[in-house]
Image (cartoon, rainbow, N blue to C red):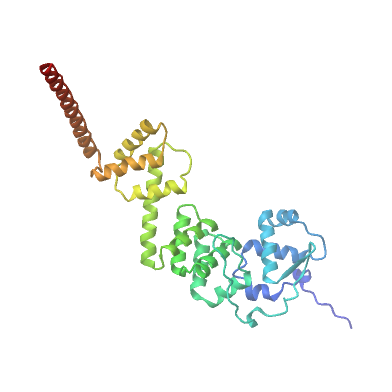
Amino acid sequence: MNHKLNLGAWNSVFAVPSAVVDNYIKLAGGNNLKVLLFILRNAGGEIAVDEVSAKTGVISDDVKDALLFWEQTGILAIREDELTPSDTLIESEASRPAANYKKIELERDPHFFPKEIARAVRNDKGMDFLFKECERIFGRPLKHNEQNSLMVITEDVGIPAECALMLVEYCASCGKATPAYMRKIAKDWHEREILTINEAENEIKILREINSFEGRLKRLLEMKRAFSEKEKTIIRRWSSGNYEEEILYAAYQMTLDGANEMSFPYMNKILENWDKDGIKNKEQLEESQKKSKKNKKQNEDSKSSFDIDKIWQNIIEK
């Protein structure tokens, strides 16, 4: 007697490696899982990136990132444009001894492998919390380059996870939550030893004030372009100088008159001279200008009187 197993809707099934669920279900993200499922479902046929993109709704660049992700995890191997099961897939990730994280120069793109990231998230409650909170901030699963950046910030740069979370929140709030910008801020914090929650809070407060000051200054100086790094260094000094906007605008107008164009060093010199004279507001500037005009007039009168006396003396002598 012959029997037939009827799985109903499951009659058409395909295999998914258990390691995908066991090790990478939290780390992979929606796009990576979509791409992998589509590839596994269409095994045996030729698969183009554009086709995967069209069928999954994942943009082509993210499809390529997903393929790289699954290659680095050891789920897939790419050999001469052919996707095959990796030779290392049989080995359980959990059974492997923990390896030292590779140290990477901050200026370079990070290259932590997904298996290293997964291990860090699995074994460190702080990292697990950091990744979950970052997903909440972004409102989506983290991309692989974002995961890498968090690893670089915490493992290579040495920023504690709680401070790294504050850094990400700040970058997201000002629309600059790119991996490159976050690593740049992290490097600056490390160099200035901003490594505690209180220090991070104070630094973020200063950064917010500077950002607000830069926006007002850009409108004041009628600038359309972004400030350069050298200009931002000067602006940071101005921000801490407690100048009123009238003073900054007066220095700007004097710069245009003296240099015939906007020059940050020229304007900075004007403000430095006013600092020496204790000038911080409009009233102090007006009072200083009055004294300057008065002294100038007195000097001219004195010079004129001296010249007349000398001429009269010459006449007497002759």
Q: Position of residue 193 (x, y in %)?
A: 41, 66
Q: Nearer the viewer, residue 200 or 318?
A: 318
Which residue is found at the position 61% from the left and 63% from the top?
A: 144
Q: Residue furthest left?
A: 316
Which residue is found at the position 88% from the left and 81% from the top?
A: 2
Q: Is residue 154 above or below residue 176?
A: below
Q: Is residue 278 above or below residue 125?
A: above
Task: Give the number of callouts.
Answer: 0
Q: Position of residue 153 (x, y in %)?
A: 51, 65
Q: Is residue 214 above or below residue 140?
A: above
Which residue is found at the position 75% from the left and 55% from the top?
A: 51
Which residue is found at the position 19% from the left and 34% from the top?
A: 291
From where the camera sits, is residue 13 visible? no
Q: Position of residue 227 (x, y in %)?
A: 46, 44
Q: Nearer the viewer, residue 4 or 82?
A: 82
Q: Nearer the viewer, residue 83 or 290?
A: 290
Is residue 91 toward the left or the right of residue 201 in the image? Answer: right
Screen quadrant of the N terminus: bottom right
Screen quadrant of the C terminus: top left
From where the camera sits, is residue 231 visible? yes
Q: Position of residue 222 (x, y in %)?
A: 42, 36
Is residue 145 toward the left or the right of residue 91 in the image? Answer: left
Q: Residue furthest right?
A: 1
Q: Nearer the viewer, residue 301 or 52?
A: 301
